Image (spheres, rainbow, N blue to C red):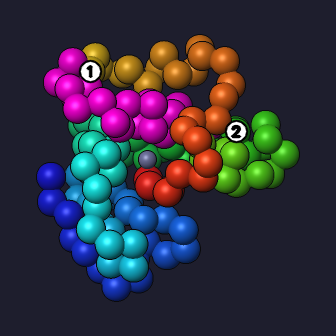
Amino acid sequence: MKVIYTRNFPPGNFHGINLFGFIFASRRWGVMLPHELRHELIHTMQQVEMGFVGFYVWYGVEWLVRWVQYRFDSERAYFAISLEREAYAHEREEGYPKRRRHYAFLHELRKPKKRVGGGKPSKQT
Ligand SMILES: [Zn+2]
């Protein structure tokens, strides 16, 4: 997994973004930590099993549905996306990528709503 550090991309509160398996991280937030790298690795695994384009289509559609569901609260919509919920729920488990099952994010669709993590986690896509 290749991490490309940039000056200001991704913008805003996003620390990193995974585009087709390449991680772009803004230097403003420092070097990516192990759990952040694992978060992105989980997204790369999701992308591979969904044929990359399928990942972005699913991501966009689910964000839109959640955005409406949560009355246009974009941050809440982001954390509710099943792909993000899986990544945040398991980013601190070292062995997770090896034992992860295909399409594990689908299980997140069935779980009751909850905000992942304590406080305000750094955003990653
Ligand atoms: Zn993410």
Q: Residue at x 26, y 26 (%)?
A: 96
Residue that mark 1 sits on: 100
Residue that mark 2 sits on: 65
Discs 1/2, front: 1
Q: Position of residue 62 (x, y in %)?
A: 60, 38
Q: Position of residue 102 (x, y in %)?
A: 29, 20
Q: On the picture, is 20 further left or further right than 125?
A: left
Q: Position of residue 117 (x, y in %)?
A: 54, 38
Q: Amino acid at mark 2?
A: Val
Q: Between residue 90 and residue 106, name the one nearer to us.
A: 90
Q: Residue furthest bottom?
A: 7
Q: Residue at x 44, y 55 (%)?
A: 124
Which stretch did the figure color magenta?
80-99
Residue 88 visible within the image: yes
Binning the other alpha carbons within 10 Å of mark 2 as few (below 14), some (14 to 19) or many (20 upward) gives: some
Q: Are the residues tagged 1 and 2 within 8 Å (C-beta)?
A: no
Q: Residue at x 84, y 45 (%)?
A: 71
Binning the other alpha carbons within 10 Å of mark 1 as few (below 14), some (14 to 19) or many (20 upward) gives: few
Distance from mark 2 CB to nearest ligand 1 atom below 8 Å: no
Q: Amino acid at mark 1?
A: Arg
As helix, strand or loop, the secondary structure at mark 1 comes to loop
Q: On the picture, is 26 further left or further right than 5?
A: right
Above or below, comparing residue 7 to residue 125 in the picture: below
- Specify the principal SS of the magenta part: helix
